[in-house]
């Protein structure tokens, strides 16, 4: 796993090839620790008005493409 900056570059260039652990690392750095509800989803609070959430889940070790794109828009 690389630095957060390298992971973000990879997310921009290859959103289909992002590991869940990489996406989790980026989210944790930008949004803090996730709220865990005991499910397979990790939910991160964002600091913006309306209190939007980032919801990510592990898909056999990979991150889902639409979730990678959502994080890119919100970081």
Image: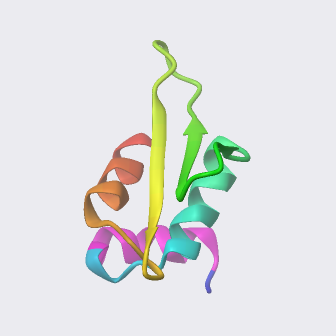
Q: Is residue 4 magenta?
A: yes
Q: Position of residue 35 (x, y in %)?
A: 67, 41
Asked whether 54 or 9 is in front, the reply is: 54
Colour mode of the rendering: rainbow
Taking the image as shown, residue 24 lies to the left or right of residue 49, namely right
Asked whether 35 or 47 is in front, the reply is: 35
Examine the rendered structure and indicate whether residue 58 appears above or below residue 2.
above
Q: Position of residue 12 (x, y in %)?
A: 32, 68
Q: Position of residue 40 (x, y in %)?
A: 53, 59
Examine the rendered structure and indicate whether residue 46 appears above or below residue 51.
below
Asked whether 12 or 67 is in front, the reply is: 67
| Residue at the extreme top of the image, as rendered | 50
Q: Which picture quadrant has residue 22?
A: bottom right
Asked whether 49 or 5 is in front, the reply is: 49
Q: Is residue 16 magenta?
A: no
Residue range (magenta): 3-15
- What residue sits 56% from the left and 69% below the top? 5
- What residue sits 62% from the left and 86% below the top? 1
- What residue sits 26% from the left and 57% below the top? 66
Examine the rendered structure and indicate whether residue 69 appears above or below residue 46.
below
Taking the image as shown, residue 13 lies to the left or right of residue 51, namely left
Q: Which picture quadrant has residue 2?
A: bottom right
Answer whether residue 75 is visible to the viewer in this image. Answer: no
Taking the image as shown, residue 26 lies to the left or right of residue 17, namely right
Q: Where is residue 60 in the image (x, y as percent from the top left)?
A: 43, 81
- What residue sits 36% from the left and 60% below the top? 68
The secondary structure that most of the magenta stretch takes on is: helix
């Amino acid at each position: 796993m690389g630095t957060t900056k390298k992971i973000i570059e990879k997310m921009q260039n290859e959103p289909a090839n992002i590991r869940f652990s990489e996406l989790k690392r980026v989210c944790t750095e930008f949004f803090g620790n996730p709220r865990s509800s005991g499910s397979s989803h990790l939910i991160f609070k964002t600091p913006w008005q309306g209190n939007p959430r980032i919801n990510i889940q592990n898909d056999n070790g990979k991150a889902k493409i639409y979730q990678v794109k959502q994080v890119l828009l919100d970081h």
